[in-house]
Amino acid sequence: SQQGEEDPQALSIQEGENATMNCSYKTSINNLQWYRQNSGRGLVHLILIRSNEREKHSGRLRVTLDTSKKSSSLLITASRAADTASYFCATDLSNYQLIWGAGTKLIIKP
Amino acid sequence: GAGVSQSPRYKVAKRGQDVALRCDPISGHVSLFWYQQALGQGPEFLTYFQNEAQLDKSGLPSDRFFAERPEGSVSTLKIQRTQQEDSAVYLCASSSRGGGLAETQYFGPGTRLLVL
């Protein structure tokens, strides 16, 4: 079963534009993580935000978390062709299990 | 050291055949995870090891699936009597501590299994 749901399922934007992806989840969490997956580098961890945090930045990435709405967003600013990938959110269901959404497929057009 | 490696990268099996998938985690990493990823979906948890102890195998889909990590480093995922629904990418990940999920998991490139 998958807890997280990313929205939109697919997103196509021009290089240089900002991309926003959303993730909703169902149960209480301790942490939420965002990962990127492309054919070249596999699945790569981007950022982890804890349940007591509301916003976190890493380079061109900005993640927000709203635990009252059980949702998170990932903003990529000034997109580049290399950002073309699928983006997944993952939440902790138990001590060891990460539950993943189906992902947002992001395409950056040159 | 080097990242997580998995072998083989691709495996084609005939239905009913047994397969073994290998994962070499980052040296010294305590935690090791196996995931199954179907096409167009996110990974789904299969099992978790802390050193050589398999602490959670609740995600293994059937008793045909078996995982081990006998010396607390390399892990093998074995699938017996493969079925077509086993076709997927099998991902291995490791993390440095045994403290659960509040840390980065490093993923291998995956093994793409196709059962004919």
Image (spheres, coloured by chain):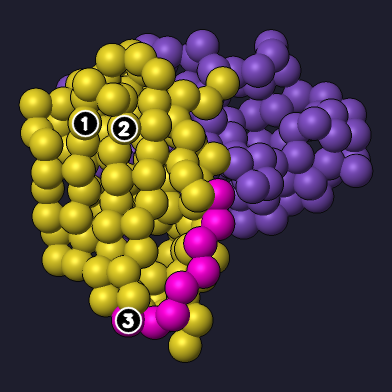
Chain colours: A yellow, B purple
Circle on res. A71:
2
The residues bearing labels 1 and 3 have C-alpha atoms spaced at a distance of 27 Å
Q: Are marks 3 and 2 on the same chain?
A: yes
Q: Which x, y percent locates residue B22?
A: 54, 42
The chain ID associated with circle 2 is A
What residue sits 75% from the left and 32% below the top? B86
Q: Residue furthest front?
A: A69
Range of residues picked out in magenta:
A9-16
What residue sits 16% from the left and 26% below the top? A51
**Residue B57 visible at all:** yes
Which residue type does callout 3 highlight?
Gly
The residues bearing labels 1 and 2 have C-alpha atoms spaced at a distance of 5 Å
Could you tell me which secondary element the residue under label 2 belongs to?
strand
Q: Quadrant of residue A23?
A: top left
Q: Is residue B33 left or right of residue A11?
A: left
Tell me if mark 2 has few (under 14), some (14-19) or many (20+) residues whose alpha carbon lies within 10 angstroms of its own: some
The residue labelled by disc 1 is: A66
Q: Main secondary structure of the magenta part?
A: strand
Is the residue under label 2 in contact with that under label 1 (CB below 8 Å)?
yes
In depth, the one of A19 and B75 nearer the eye is A19
Decide whether residue A11 is among the magenta residues.
yes
Tell me if mark 1 has few (under 14), some (14-19) or many (20+) residues whose alpha carbon lies within 10 angstroms of its own: some
Q: Which x, y percent locates residue B68?
A: 50, 24
Quadrant location of the C terminus of chain B in the rendered image? top right
Q: Earlier in the sequence, mark 3 or mark 2?
A: 3
Is the residue under label 3 in contact with that under label 1 (CB below 8 Å)?
no
Q: Earlier in the sequence, mark 1 or mark 2?
A: 1
Which residue type does callout 2 highlight?
Ser
